[in-house]
Amino acid sequence: MSALMEWFGPVTVMQRAIIGIAAAVIVLLLLVGLTALLVGLKRAVLAWVVVLGLVVATLVFLPVSTDGLTSSPDPTTDYAGAVARFEAERAKTKEPLNPLCEPKLMGHGQRTEKVVVLVHGVSSCPQAYVDFAPILFDRGHNVLVLRMPQNGFADRATDALRFMTAQQLAEFGDDAVDMATGLGNDVIFVGISAGGTITGWVAQNRSDVDRAVLLAPFFGLHGFGPDVNRMLMRAMLLLPDVSIWKDPVMRENADNVMPHAYKRQSTTATGEIMRLGYATWRQATEKKAATAEIVVVTNEADTAVSNSTTDAVADAWTDQGVAVTTYVFDASHGLGHEIIDPLEPGADPALTYPIVLDFIETGQHAD
């Protein structure tokens, strides 16, 4: 499967999913043909229809565990304690890191009125905020730029992402809030892509976060709605991991991948991120989010994530009476998925940064 997908070269997330589905259909037709040689065409078709029905039923109805994806707060209460917690968490990393990917605490030496937590997307690292974080710091905020589990390793061709779990991401979100509470009076939690998924989970579970800002959050794959994305999530969690090279020709020697990003993705990691997003949606349908203000920013030109699946999560929050503000970057801007990273193809910081800054600092943006 991986080799087939790589043969097509650089394609969008939706195109990769379609290629995978098409490959599965081709395999099914071949199996029907081989079975027909043994038992006849009618019996072969009937047998495989039954098998296919069982597979579809599994992908639709199989329970997905969200156990363990609950919050266990242990907040810091002062600046020194927060700095100590940050250093202790950073020291836990045993794997050599990409020099660009060290987490950063940009502090003013004391608690500030606002502390902003910044979380990058999957296969990226804190370098995504290299230009944005200093702006926040210069505006007087303490800034915490954190590295997501299994990301940012020195080996950019690593397959470490396949070890990433929804539990790790939930614990990471908890730890991030716990550090931030000692750094500022108001905690503003911001995440892009998979970091936006974590931000959504934090918004649902942590009342000590004053505002959560989700930037192009990843709750599902582009081109598919919530129902199909849940099926795809189940498939990725059930099937063996497929590690997909971003440049299928050059692979580990690719020089066209951002220097702070991994050179391949993991289907298992994708499924686990979606599982955290699924847990967030389920929790949101059952009870009101703990965070008072939630901002959801999406991009019509995004070819990585499903905006309709994101909308379903935002709608669940709204139905529970949460103050949700939404903003959509028009497709005419041609923005890439990582709207914060200055190296993302299609990036336009002059457009995106002022708007995102408004949402971080005030929760509103005047068009």
Image (tube, helix red, strand yellow):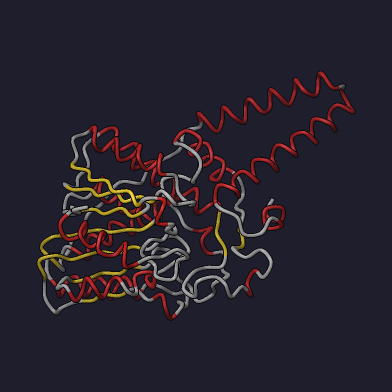
- In which image quadrant can residue 124 be found? bottom left
- In the rendered image, residue 101, in percent from the top left (x then y), is placed at 41, 75
Image-quadrant location for residue 283: top left
Q: Vertical placement of 242 versus 21: above or below?
A: below
Q: Is residue 258 left or right of residue 276?
A: right
| In-front residue for pair 54/191 | 191
Is any part of residue 327 visible from this angle? yes
Is there any visible trace of residue 66 in the rendered image?
no
How many numbered badges does the structure rendering display?
Answer: 0
Q: Position of residue 307 (x, y in %)?
A: 40, 44
Instruction: Say which residue appears at 50% left-offset and 28% top-offset.
Output: 61
Report the residue that reaches farthest toward the front: 332
Q: Is residue 161 above or below residue 276?
A: below
Residue at 58% from the left image edge and 70% from the top image edge: 157
In the rendered image, residue 294, in percent from the top left (x then y), is placed at 23, 48
Relative to 194, is 311 above or below? above
